[in-house]
Amino acid sequence: MVGIPRRRVLALGALGAAGAFAAACSSPPPADRPAWASGVHAWDPARSLYHPDAPWPRWTAARTAGRGHVTTMLDSITHGAGVPGLSRPCQQYSWPGRLRRILDGRFGPSGTGVAVPWNGLLPTDPRFQVFGPVGEAPLGMHACACLRIPGAPDDGAAVEFTGDGDTFRVHHLGPGIRFAVDGVPVLPSSQVGSTHVVSTVPAGQYGTHVLRVLSPGREPTSTASLLGVEAGTATGMRVSNLARAGLSAGSLVADDAGGLRGLAVSVDAMAADLAILLVSANDFRAHVPVATFVERIRTTIRRQRATGGDVLLATPGEPDPGIFPPDHVLDPPLTDYLAALYGLADAEDVPLLDLRARWGAHADAAARGFFTDGIHPNDRGSEDIAQAVAAVLL
């Protein structure tokens, strides 16, 4: 793209082309209550929503205030990186990126949400730039998102993040980490935590800014461990996409006592008003016992509830049974996992958005143009998921 500075390119929102695309997309017709659904609670056919009257005190308060935080999990359906048929960058065109656009239109600009520096996937996020011998560690979000920034005599080892806002929030391990905004050293205005630390770094007037993250000192033994960065403001409805390709329910609960990975990062430290769990695809692929899957999602729900936040469960659309699972073994069948999620919605008193019911069988969803490869949603499918989620949230 010629003639537009890099900062401006990265700051461009999805309001233009994506907004026009949304207007051109038609939603599926109201869905009948699916055969795998529990009969305990009500079914809203227009929204494909089970248990629409579930209590959501934290999200209701955030929506009323016009300020809050939404996190999304779990796998490539939500992450979007590397998915053919999905526009780039995935941070903008995945369904969470599109949901951010919708919520920004309702509540005003909120910023980037927490951007996760995924190990091995940093080139898929153009907002990050790495300088010098920066390494990775099996820590942070789902134990696979931590950049290790060593000290260097000339401060040549660093990570930069570009985003719109007047403030950066930086998730890192331990104290002493150094920051610069637009080339000028800046001290944090506040720091919360001792192991997992969240530093608030002022960026000045609202606009596009570049945050540079440096180790505490210039000696090689001094190291900064970066877990996530967010650019934004004190207002609006933040959306943080915490999904990564390949994750399953077991990835969610891979916790440790030190608070350096697992739910301590993805749930406790995020302190979201609402966590959206679109789950079951990779558990179905790996033939994880349904009871094991259920207990892992139950653990995540209860951990989120312990922070005071709410939960929305969601099912994926049905993948092409001819290619997924790759071993062609349909045992347990996908409907067993879907039925189990309804049981969880009953037991844990949470609502459930059923995209399988909304989209119908795979052949129907493919005919509507929602899939790119028989497994992942393309632009049209991602837009429909975002619209479906927004209809539930708003």
Image (cartoon, rainbow, N blue to C red):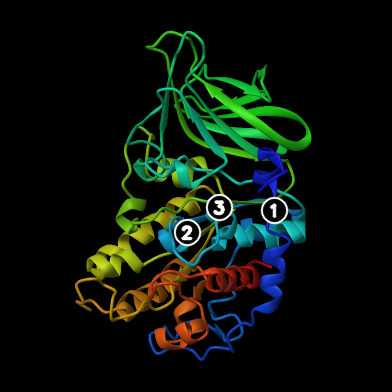
Q: Is residue 162 left or right of residue 33?
A: right
Q: CA distance from mark 3 to mark 2?
A: 8 Å
Task: Classify mark 3: residues with Cα within 10 Å, few (<14), some (14-19) or many (20+).
Answer: many
Could you tell me residue 389's position as x and y percent?
A: 59, 69
User: Mark 3 and 2 residues: CB-CB less than 8 Å, in contact?
Assistant: yes
Secondary structure at numbered mark 1 = loop
State which tag comes first along the sequence, 3 or 2. Answer: 2
Could you tell me residue 96's position as x and y percent?
A: 56, 59
Secondary structure at numbered mark 2 = loop
Quarter in which the C terminus is drawn: bottom right
Q: Is residue 262 left or right of residue 165?
A: left
Q: Residue at x 51, y 14 (%)?
A: 155
Q: How many marks?
A: 3
In the displayed structure, would residue 185 be above or below residue 163?
A: above
In the displayed structure, would residue 248 be above or below residue 290?
A: above
Determine the residue located farthest toward the right in the rendered image: 205
Which residue in the structure is indicated by mark 3? 91
Residue type pointed to by label 3: Gln
Q: Residue at x 40, y 38 (%)?
A: 140
Q: Is residue 267 left or right of residue 22?
A: left
State which tag comes first along the sequence, 2 or 1. Answer: 1
Pick the residue in front: 22 or 87. Answer: 87
Pick the residue in front: 183 or 337. Answer: 183
Determine the residue located farthest toward the front in the rendered image: 2
Which residue in the structure is indicated by mark 2? 80
Could you tell me residue 283's position as x and y percent?
A: 29, 65
Could you tell me residue 223's position as x and y percent?
A: 42, 18
Q: Residue at x 50, y 68 (%)?
A: 350
Quadrant housing residue 388? bottom right
Secondary structure at numbered mark 3 = helix
Which residue in the structure is indicated by mark 1? 13
Residue type pointed to by label 1: Gly
